[in-house]
Amino acid sequence: MAFTHTVGATRHVFADLRTLLARASPARSGDALAGVAAASEEERMAARMALAEVPLARFLAEALIPYEDDEVTRLIVDGHDAGAFAEIASLTVGDFRNWLLAHETDESVLARVAPGITPEMAAAVSKLMRNQDLIAVARKCRVVTRFRNTIGLPGRLSVRLQPNHPTDDPRGIAASIIDGLLYGCGDATIGINPAGDNLAAIVGLLHLVDELRARHDVPTQSCVLTHVTNTLRAIEAGAPVDLVFQSVAGSEQANAAFGIDLALLAEAREAALSLGRGTVGDNVMYFETGQGSALSANAHHGVDQQTMEARAHGVARAFSPLLVNTVVGFIGPEYLYDGKQIIRAGLEDHFCGKLIGVPMGCDVCYTNHAEADQDDMDNLLTLFGVAGINFIMGVPGADDIMLNYQSTAFHDALYLREAMGLRPAPEFEAWLRQNGIVDPRGRLLPPTARQPLLAMAQGL
């Protein structure tokens, strides 16, 4: 059944739900590249007006990618919690927006209905929302996870310490780790993107971080962000694996381009759980997503990139991850052209993930050929602080010298915590205080007070 809306003398017709969602999306270069974007602002607004009248139940009856063709669709449909959905089953997409913004719809209510919200429902309602709406609702969503510390509590902001090195040099990586710890970063994870896929090197990095963590009793977790099959091999080799990393996407075909399927993710999760390395919880998975990944693999099935991103969050939700982050500006201007598009996409991703119960963070980033700069990232970073994001990245100098893109620095995390009155994960904050890195108010102390780690740095 087609969807229609008339503007003046023009009757806009949208052939199906997939087309309607694509035309209702805010403008972005990726959807234009895919040929699914609205042809005009009038068509975009007509699509939004039509979308507002669509019952949420329609998303359970009409799959954007056929059930029989796609295991991600099957995961979403088969995992849907009808009981949780009952509370909102009578609403249209427009009603759903109003319900989400209502004062009565608080943290406990949102947590209760989250298992009943499909990624497509979350994507649909986001298309009717201004940036402030996305922030206001995401701020009410609380998703808390645990491994060696507790991430996502109110008033807390965690940081992934990202000590990448172009040659995986252990001394260079160790120096960046110490630098980050001295700035109070690293409670989300100490996560290294390796320059190569050599298993011996990956195992060496896992031992490096684990030995440093254990020597100083740092209450955090480590991760080498290699392909999931390499992590499985590292586990088999006896390496100290805390978290299993993998990039995921919103369709079976896109995940196949990453060299994964859902069964492989389940196998990896069970392998990590069998190690029993968590001390306060057992969330052992770390996923990264990003708008445009399905399109770049020609695996988007005509679905707009933001809805495909929400479906990737649906994949993540099924595996109870510790961390999920959208690498929002990393893929490039072909998908998110400028700072405005990157900011909007980041807020959408955070909102959709949090709404369905995913512990969302963001790599607030851009590539050097995008029409964006660090001021745009400052704006998005600040908006995320208001929105209650779980974690951000901490990269030395904000410049990743291995992946060659611009992100957020250790200093940026200090700014956001100070400006918003946010603190690290509680277990990590206690460690920072014990080691003279922060004062009782959570503020960074002068270098002369940080003798243990400084002494270790001098020994590199």
Image: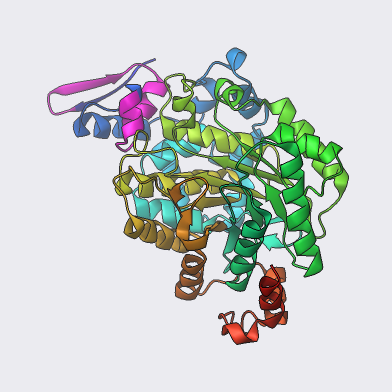
Looking at the image, residue 218 sits to the left or right of residue 77; the answer is right
| Residue 108: image location, x then y, percent | 61, 56
The quadrant the N terminus occupies is top left
- Residue sitting nearer the eye, 301 or 289: 289
Q: Is residue 14 magenta?
A: yes
Residue 181 lies, with reference to residue 276, above or below; the image says: below
Q: Position of residue 441 (x, y in %)?
A: 59, 83
Residue at 53% from the left image edge and 21% from the top image edge: 61
The residue lying at 72 percent from left, 70 percent from top is 427
Give the mark count: 0
Q: Residue at x 66, y 59 (%)?
A: 171
Q: Position of residue 431 (x, y in %)?
A: 72, 74
* Image quadrant where residue 254 sits: top right
Closest to the observer, 437 or 317: 437
| Residue sitting nearer the eye, 250 or 414 | 414
Which part of the image, by quadrant, shows the C terminus? Answer: bottom right
Residue furthest left as drawn = 9
* Residue 192 included in the magenta stretch of the image: no
326 lies left or right of 72: left
Query: Is residue 186 among what the camera can see?
Result: no
| Residue 12 visible in the snapshot | yes
Hey, which quadrant is residue 2 in on the image? Answer: top left
Residue 224 x/y as whole percent:
68, 46
Which residue is more in the foreground, 13 or 166?
166
| Colour option used | rainbow
What residue range appears in magenta? 7-33
